[in-house]
Image: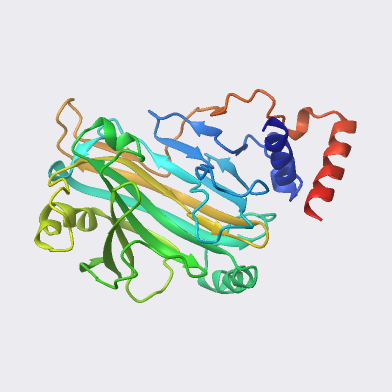
Amino acid sequence: MKRSLILRRIALLLLGASWVQANTDGVEVICGQEYVGDVTGPLMYNPNPWNHKSPDGGFSCMRVDNSTPAYDATWNWGANIQDVHAFPYVRFGSVDLPMRLSSIRSIHLSTDWIMTAGSISEFPRVFTKSIWSKNKSKLEKNNIQANAAWDFFLDNDRNKTLYPQVAAIEFMVWLGSVGDPWWLGRLNSTILSNITLGDAEFSLYYGRNSGGTHVFTAVPRDGEDILSIDQDFYPLLEFILKQAHKHPEIPDDLPRDPYLGIVEFGTETWYSDGNATFTAANFGMKLDGDVESNGSNSSDNNSTSENGGGSSDGDDDSAAVTLDVLPVFIYTTAVMLIVGALW
């Protein structure tokens, strides 16, 4: 386990100069269940390879730059295209969360994103439609299957909103995708509603996953990828509060006025014939609402937010060695092992 994590991390550091220089530039590289930031801070990052059925040769790593803020999540899963293997994300914290949906006045979210075949080697990051058109063509040739999505978790129990595996509701907002990834509710083609955010219109679907979670998924109605968004997302979440119980497809056990807890932006990663990189930058959250338990009624975790979070390993793996502390002979051996494993 430790050897595998070390090799995966070195492999990513060898992909480009930007990764090799991460430690000297004050930018952190994390892999597996490592994270940057704190669960109580404004921003937390996690490569989040959560699926225990994922192929042994796959990986999920992130290059985190909080000065922008931005992250580049490089991943590779060469088997089991039907499964989501990881959801690398940035999580947005607030002293006011969890908060009842009925207490929220607005939840303004912003981000830019793009995907690239291979790894990022040149900066600054570019999020134009012309670049995306070229990138997407290359990604599709590599059979990449992934999306770009906001992810929210809700429950009647405040504490459960902070644990995705037990929260009663998951609400996803897809901004785009590569390949042909499926969302819950797509099979029966039942659209609950069409909801407009700014210039974009989303179609809303519903389904339940294998754990019984109520899953709402909003996807762009016209099928166009939305590379940049800066909007109040409350009109989407408000559907749960005001409209969901009117639909016969939705069971009666759906909470009527749940708390919103987790807010994340990332990419669900299904499959790739080679390394792929998801990049997000200039993201932020501004939450406004009435708080039950403290004197604050708004929080602003915008693109100027800073945190001093270090990284820690969810597996308590003290052997997660970075490139700058490896002796030369270990570095050479690692390169040979990687070449042998990948080629």
| Quarter of the N terminus within the rendering | top right
Left or right placement of residue 209 versus residue 63 in this view: left
Q: Position of residue 24 (x, y in %)?
A: 70, 34
Count of residue discs: 0
Which residue is at the front of the view, 238 or 269? 269
Q: Position of residue 70 (x, y in %)?
A: 52, 47
Residue 53 in sight from this viewpoint = yes
Which residue is at the front of the view, 197 or 169? 169
Q: Position of residue 87 (x, y in %)?
A: 48, 48
Q: What's the residue at 74%, 39% (across, down)? A: 7
Q: Position of residue 33 (x, y in %)?
A: 54, 35
Where is 138 relative to 230, above or below? Answer: below
Residue 21 in sight from this viewpoint = no
Where is 23 relative to 302, above or below? Answer: above
Where is 201 relative to 310, above or below? Answer: below
Q: What's the residue at 50%, 56% (across, down)? A: 83
Left or right placement of residue 324 versus residue 286 in this view: right
Which residue is at the front of the view, 221 or 209? 209
- Residue furthest bottom in the image: 222
Scheme by which the image is coloured:
rainbow
Left or right placement of residue 124 versus residue 284 in this view: right
The quarter of the picture where residue 63 lies is top right
| Quarter of the C terminus within the rendering | bottom right
Left or right placement of residue 23 versus residue 227 in this view: right
